[in-house]
Image (cartoon, grey):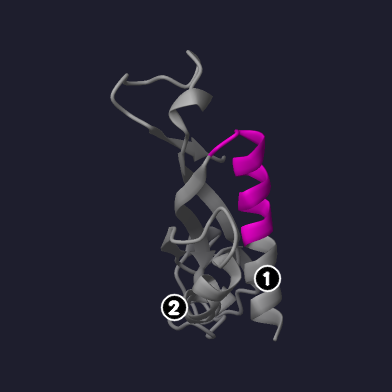
């Protein structure tokens, strides 16, 4: 099952980042997932399985769906097509094969928990807070 492999690679990436930050555990993973990826349901389905026994076990998965956007050469602008698999311009009817957005899978943020002894002055945002969010651009 290739969805399981993709989910496993995603969790490996998150675990690697969390280990570099010396985090105790990952509490949330935020992902931007393109509408065309058709991976949303499969990722939710196998998430618990691939996180079991890792620093990500028990983490919440948050998925932001990125809508499909195409570029129409005739209208010379980006727009949403009429349907998910309809690559014709909704306005002029011409083919729009240039996908601008909607195929991506991107980790946008990870919420980490740190052991109190692992905190450094660089990580302290609030002295009562024991978690941080790592953002990716």
Question: Closer to the camera: disc 1 or disc 2?
Answer: 1
Helix, strand or loop at mark 1: helix
Is residue 87 one of those drawn in magenta? no
Quarter holding the C terminus is top right
Mark sitting on residue 75: none
Front one among 80 and 7: 7
Residue 51: name its quadrant.
bottom right
The residue indicated by pointer 2 is 90
Query: Which residue is found at the position 62% from the left and 69% from the top?
Result: 7
Q: Residues within 10 Å of mark 1 (few under 14, many from 20)?
A: some
Q: Nearer the viewer, residue 22 or 8?
A: 22
Q: Position of residue 59 (x, y in %)?
A: 44, 58
Name, please, the residue furthest toward the front: 117
Q: Is residue 21 magenta?
A: yes
Say which of 81 and 23 sits in front: 23
State the image coordinates of residue 25 (x, y, percent, origin top left).
50, 46
Kindly tell me whether residue 129 is visible in this rendering. Answer: yes
Point 64% across, 61% down: residue: 10
**Circle 2 SS class:** loop
Q: Quadrant of residue 76?
A: bottom right
Circle 2: is it few (<14), some (14-19), or many (20+) Cα within 10 Å? Answer: some
Residue furthest toward the left? 128
Label 1 and label 2: CA atoms lie apart by 33 Å
Q: Quadrant of the N terminus?
A: bottom right
The residue range painted magenta reads 11-23
Q: Of helix, strand and loop, which mostly describes the magenta segment?
A: helix
Q: Position of residue 126 (x, y in %)?
A: 31, 21
Q: Is residue 125 left or right of residue 51?
A: left
Q: Closest to the observer: 115 or 33?
A: 115
Nearer-N-terminus badge (1/2): 1
Q: Which residue is mark 1?
A: 6
* Drawn side of residue 13 relative to residue 51, left or right: right
């Amino acid at each position: 099952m290739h969805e399981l492999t993709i989910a496993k690679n995603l969790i490996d990436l998150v675990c690697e980042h969390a280990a570099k930050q010396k985090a105790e555990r990952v509490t949330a993973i935020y992902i931007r997932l393109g509408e065309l990826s058709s991976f949303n349901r499969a990722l939710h389905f196998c998430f618990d399985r691939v996180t079991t026994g890792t620093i990500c076990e028990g983490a919440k998965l948050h998925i932001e769906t990125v809508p499909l956007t195409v570029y129409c050469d005739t209208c010379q602008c980006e727009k949403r097509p009429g349907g998910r698999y309809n690559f014709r311009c909704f306005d002029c009817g011409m083919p729009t094969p240039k996908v601008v957005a909607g195929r991506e899978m991107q980790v946008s943020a990870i919420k980490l928990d740190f052991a109190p002894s692992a905190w450094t002055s660089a990580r302290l945002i609030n002295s009562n807070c024991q978690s941080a969010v790592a953002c990716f651009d």
